[in-house]
Amino acid sequence: MAAAAATAKLQEQFDAGLQTRPDFTIDQPLARYGAVDHAVWDQLYRRQSALLAGRASDAFLSGAQSLGLNVAHVPSFEAVSERLMPATGWRIVAVPGLVPDRIFFEHLANRRFPVTWWMRRPDQLDYLQEPDCFHDLFGHVPLLTDPVFADAIRAYGQAALAAHARDARALTLLARLYWYTVEFGLMREAGAPHGVKIYGAGIVSSKGESLYSVESEAPNRIAFDLDRVLRTRYRIDTFQKTYFVIESFGQLFEALGEGVAARLADPAALLDGPAFGAGDVLAGDTVLTRGTGAGWLEDGDV
């Protein structure tokens, strides 16, 4: 969502001959996908589908199937939207990559999910710093078939637009909330490893983090609390030190909508207070699993 990165990507796409609209959307350039792009999609889809069986939320797995993502080529965004819209009113729109924050929030508030059009290279299967088509489409879109989750994301977009208009400093808090839920969230489910399953897009699209988040003894797994999350820094360069665990998508809807709207009416009250490190465990936390901290990097929280 960073403006500088979005501007640079926009210029790159313009130079490549892709026409970007004022809302940063483009027509998905299906003719630009080559055999390597399709092979990478197929390999990633097969690998992650196998890994996520029994580890990801049932809603995610059924959503991926219902959208027709199990194809041996990069899916058509139009075809995916045709299946998604009857379920929850959402559609996906192609973008060059990261888009400015306000534009991103406007898309979410209007039930449009921006999906990066380009695919990672074969040497980037296990790690990619910037979201690509696989992360956005496979990671984020399946849960938009779930009515409660879909409403939660729209509510977040609406609340984020209002908070951003009042005080741009709210972006720090909005980023933390999105990171620890939509990107790297877990949800409680009996019988699963450590009693939790995955729903966050940053996890389901990553081989290493799919295993680490639910099976490793290293990270903390802490019950979700809105204020706690808004005050907690995070890592962008390694697996997470802490995962926050929701009870249901209903709880997520309350947090991403009315909850964050109320808390960000005065973002200074949170920003001027204490901020917690990514690996901190506090006295008031409901700790599901206290991590060993094995392999943690000491610096780099944002």
Image (cartoon, rainbow, N blue to C red):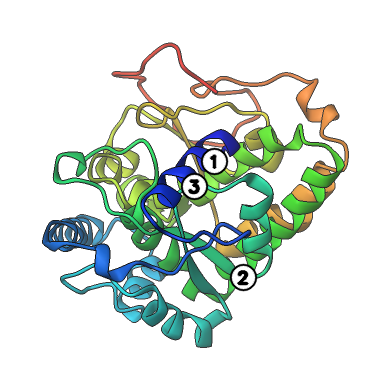
Q: Are marks 3 and 1 in contact (CB under 8 Å)?
A: yes
222 left or right of 52 in image: right
Which quadrant of the figure contains the N terminus?
A: top right
Q: Quadrant of residue 64?
A: bottom left
The residue beneath circle 3 is 10
Q: Quadrant of residue 112?
A: bottom right
Choose between 116 and 199: the one closer to the eye.
Answer: 116
| Relative vertical location of residue 219 with respect to residue 44 in this rendering, above or below | above
Choose between 299 and 28: the one closer to the eye.
Answer: 28
In the image, what residue occupies the spot 48% across and 64% down?
26
The residue beneath circle 2 is 111
Q: Residue furthest bottom?
A: 86
> Which badge, 2 or 3, is on the more N-terminal residue?
3
Residue 78 x/y as whole percent? 41, 79
In the image, what residue occupies the spot 35% across and 81% down?
66
* Numbered marks: total: 3
* Residue kind at label 2, given as amino acid type: Arg
Q: Secondary structure at mark 3?
A: helix
Q: Secondary structure at mark 2?
A: loop
| Relative vertical location of residue 59 with respect to residue 256 in this rendering, above or below | below
Choose between 38 and 301: the one closer to the eye.
Answer: 38
Choose between 49 and 252: the one closer to the eye.
Answer: 49
Estimate the spatial distance between the alpha carbons at disc 3 and disc 1, rounded to whole Å: 5 Å
Estimate the spatial distance between the alpha carbons at disc 2 and disc 3, rounded to whole Å: 22 Å
268 left or right of 286 in image: right
Q: Secondary structure at mark 1?
A: helix
How dense is the environment of label 1, judged by Cα within 10 Å: few (below 14), some, or many (20 and up)?
Answer: some
The residue beneath circle 1 is 7
